[in-house]
Image (spheres, grey):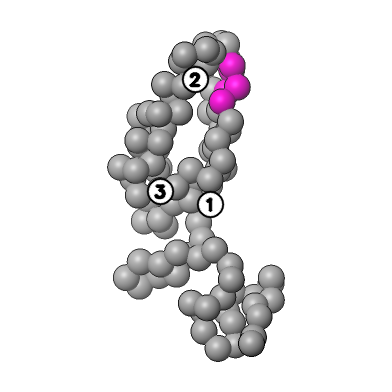
């Protein structure tokens, strides 16, 4: 059985049997991940206690609406880090809140 090289996007026998994490739509096979970092104005420590939980819920709802997937999310008191996989058509601005 053929295996994919980590440096190559194509397998010898088929792209769709490759063990890498690729998604596809009608005419594109892609793996488009964005590292998003944002913070409140003046980096105020407002993302604490119940607010951080509500923010996580809102961001997951936005991900569903934009057909994207949050791979990693960390909410700190003064900023948020997210790793998001998006469709290339939405890669410019996937999160409009």
Q: CA distance from mark 3 to mark 2?
A: 20 Å
Q: CA distance from mark 1 to mark 2?
A: 23 Å
Between 4 and 37, the residue placed more toward the observer is: 4
Task: Look at 40% across and 48% down and name the residue there.
Answer: 68
Screen quadrant of the N terminus: bottom right
Specify few, some or many for label 3: CA neighbours under 10 Å numbering under 14, 14-19, or 20 or more.
many
Looking at the image, is mark 3 or mark 2 nearer the viewer? 2
Above or below for 8 versus 66: below
Q: Which residue is mark 3?
A: 68
Residue 32 highlighted magenta (yes or no): no
Q: Which residue is mark 2?
A: 52
Q: In this orientation, does residue 41 appear?
A: no
Which numbered disc, 1 or 2, marks the residue that appears first in the sequence?
1
Q: Are marks 1 and 3 in contact (CB under 8 Å)?
A: no
Above or below for 51 versus 96: above
Residue 60, numbered label: none
Residue 77 highlighted magenta (yes or no): yes
User: Residue 7, image x and y in percent?
Assistant: 69, 72
Q: Which residue is mark 1?
A: 33
Above or below for 58 versus 63: above
Magenta stretch, main secondary structure class: loop
Please provide the residue range marked out in magenta.
75-79
């Amino acid at each position: 059985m053929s295996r994919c090289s980590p440096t190559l996007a194509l397998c010898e026998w088929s792209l769709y049997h490759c063990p890498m994490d690729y998604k596809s739509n009608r005419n594109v096979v892609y793996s488009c991940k964005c590292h998003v970092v944002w913070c409140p104005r003046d980096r105020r420590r407002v993302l604490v206690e119940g607010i951080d939980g509500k923010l996580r819920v809102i961001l997951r709802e936005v991900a569903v609406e934009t057909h994207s997937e949050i791979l990693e999310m960390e909410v700190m008191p003064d900023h948020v880090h997210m790793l998001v996989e998006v469709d290339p058509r939405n890669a410019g601005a996937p999160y409009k809140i």
